[in-house]
Image (cartoon, grey):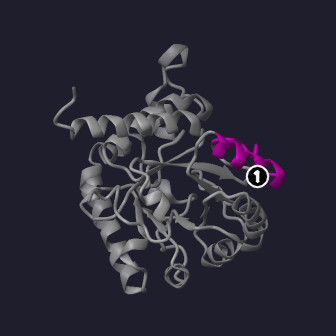
Amino acid sequence: MSTRDAVVAGLPELSGAGRCLVMGVVNITPDSFSDGGEWFEPEAGVQHGLDLLAEGADVLDVGGESTRPGAQRVTEAEELRRVVPVIGRLAAAGAVVSVDTTRAAVAERAVAAGARLVNDVSGGLADPDMAGVVAETGVPYVAMHWRGHSDVMDARQDYDDVVADVRDELAARVAALHDAGVAHEQIVLDPGLGFAKSGALNWPLLAHLDALHALGRPLLVGASRKRFLGHLLAGVRGAAADEPVPPAGRDDATTAITALAAHAGAWCVRVHAARASVDAVQVAAAWRRAETTEDTA
């Protein structure tokens, strides 16, 4: 069994999908790097989630605190005010909802409102109570590689070998989660593209997902519209050579990463625009099946 197909506790119907899953981003924030607060009001956020479902997204990831570089934290009360009503309405509409938070109290309230995953960019490092909440609720838990909050992360990107260092730091998080009572089957890992990693550091992680698969847990890949894609595309199609392409112009490159990551065995990709990535994971699944079929006639 590949790590992509490994059991993820609490999501039996998705774990058996036979392809990479697509997680659609629902930012209930006024300052997201990708959409600038376009879905900040609850009605807009709910509708955006429903639109992503209509495009084929398997999971909706609802977040109420921006993690863009330099972003300042919001209060726990404000984060709860933003996300809980949206999660409740999307869950009631039949969506599989994830909460994107680093706070244990927000995760607990979100699960009570209908969230079925916790997506923690800090991997439990930001809140010592997070592991306990995850263990008690039994929900799947995405632990991302993280070295600090958004206002300091760009100063913490010194690596001897980015692939080996990220692998080892994620392995340490898995061990700590186990010690706190989180079941092995609950854990999904995320290399944390763009978090304490400048442009060039992200490509080796994508090219060597096999090193992270060796940790034995499914992988979530979140490259959508990130800075390193903007820098890669600078100078393309008339863009200024010294100006990164803005987030809205990075969706095609995101789709390319979706296809490659899915073919490399990613369990799920996290994207802002779902339709093209839904097609890309289907293509990748057909490609993988053909590679393992002896009779192609």
The secondary structure that most of the magenta stretch takes on is: helix
**In the image, residue 19 lies in the stretch drawn in magenta:** no
Q: Nearer the viewer, residue 242 or 23?
A: 23
Q: Is residue 163 above or below residue 281?
A: below
Lateral position of residue 276 relative to residue 257, left or right: right
The N terminus is located in which quarter? bottom left
Give the residues in magenta: 34-54
Image coords of residue 51 (percent x, y): 70, 42
Answer yes or no: is residue 147 visible.
no
Q: Residue at x 59, y 56 (%)?
A: 67
Q: Residue beneath label 1, please?
A: 46
Lateral position of residue 130 relative to residue 217, left or right: right
The C terminus is located in which quarter? top left
Lateral position of residue 179 relative to residue 36, left or right: left
Image coords of residue 259 (percent x, y): 40, 36
Q: Is residue 209 above or below residue 176?
A: above
Lateral position of residue 1 relative to residue 25, left or right: left
Q: Is residue 213 above or below residue 281?
A: below
**In the image, residue 45 lies in the stretch drawn in magenta:** yes
Q: Residue at x 48, y 74 (%)?
A: 125
Image coords of residue 139 (percent x, y): 52, 73
Q: Nearer the viewer, residue 57 or 149?
A: 57
Which residue is outermost to the top? 238
Q: Residue at x 69, y 49 (%)?
A: 49
Q: Is residue 189 above or below residue 41?
A: below
Which residue is outermost to the left? 294
Q: Residue at x 21, y 29 (%)?
A: 296
